[in-house]
Amino acid sequence: MVILGFLRSLSILFLTAVASVATYLAGQVTRSRSAPERVMGWWGRSFVRLGGWRVRVEGMGGLPAGGAVLVSNHQSLVDIPLLLAAFPRPVKFIAKRELGEIPLFGKAMAAAGNLFVDREDPRDTVQMLRDAGARLRGGELLVVFPEGTRSMDGSIGEFKPGAFFLAQRSGAPVVPVYIDGGNRALPKGSLRFRPADLLVRVLPPLSGEEGAGGTKERIMASVRERILAARGAEAAGAARAGPPFPEAGGGARGRGKENG
């Protein structure tokens, strides 16, 4: 099992390196975002297939037709390829500046139209809000991870209000997204991929009072409440069904920590 996980990890790392080069070159050759976008989408789907994970996707029928801010919890490095693979339309990520500085991968992310922000630089934040607003008006789906870091055990951390400036200022629909399983597939601090069931659940968009036109604090509280409720429902279902992968260990650890 350990050898299989090691080989799977090497394959995924090789795939990521190849896809990063291909995405960057596609952007340089075409001078557009569409070709790099397609390569990144292929990378996400291939990443999930190589991982051998069973993926359950729910709620896509409620996704708005135009631009929207997708607000998701964050468990693992697996989350980005998982969301790329799950959504029927391309998604872009708003990530911290450090991610864009990763050799090869950062350039590939930029070529595909993802946005980076230095949270300590107000001018950088203002520019990101302008760029993101234009993307949303153009009908794009933008993903934000308001926890700011990955969860060690799948619990939902505190949300940072800065992530909700975009939702407040843009007036675009705000869609909570609950993901689960990434912390078991690739625990934080590890490079060995493990068996896991992965879940992407798209929750209903916030109402007018909760979303567009509301305060960032109100939007933040509403999104977190919905994601916590989704996690609670999933934990209850998993407890009734039992752990899907006993050999992976710790599938239910850390559940029930959140108090909202």
Image: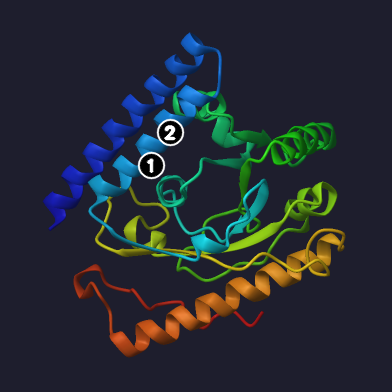
Q: Which residue is under mark 2?
A: 40
**Compared to 203, does 66 lie above or below?**
above
Q: Is residue 50 left or right of residue 95?
A: left
Q: Which residue is under mark 1?
A: 44
Query: What separation in Å lies between label 1 and label 2 (alpha carbons)?
Result: 6 Å
Q: Residue 139, percent across and down?
A: 66, 40
- Which quadrant of the rendered structure holds the N terminus? bottom left
Q: Label 2's element?
A: helix
Q: Residue 93, percent across and down?
A: 58, 42
**Compared to 189, does 230 lie above or below?**
below
Which residue is outermost to the bottom?
Answer: 240
Label 1 amino acid?
Answer: Gly
The answer to which of 6 and 180 lies nearer the viewer is 180
- Which quadrant of the rendered structure holds the C terminus? bottom right
Which picture quadrant has residue 153? bottom left
Q: How many marks?
A: 2
The answer to which of 142 and 173 lies nearer the viewer is 173
Q: Residue 157, percent across and down?
A: 61, 67
Label 2 amino acid?
Answer: Met
Residue visible at 67% across and 46% down in the picture? 67
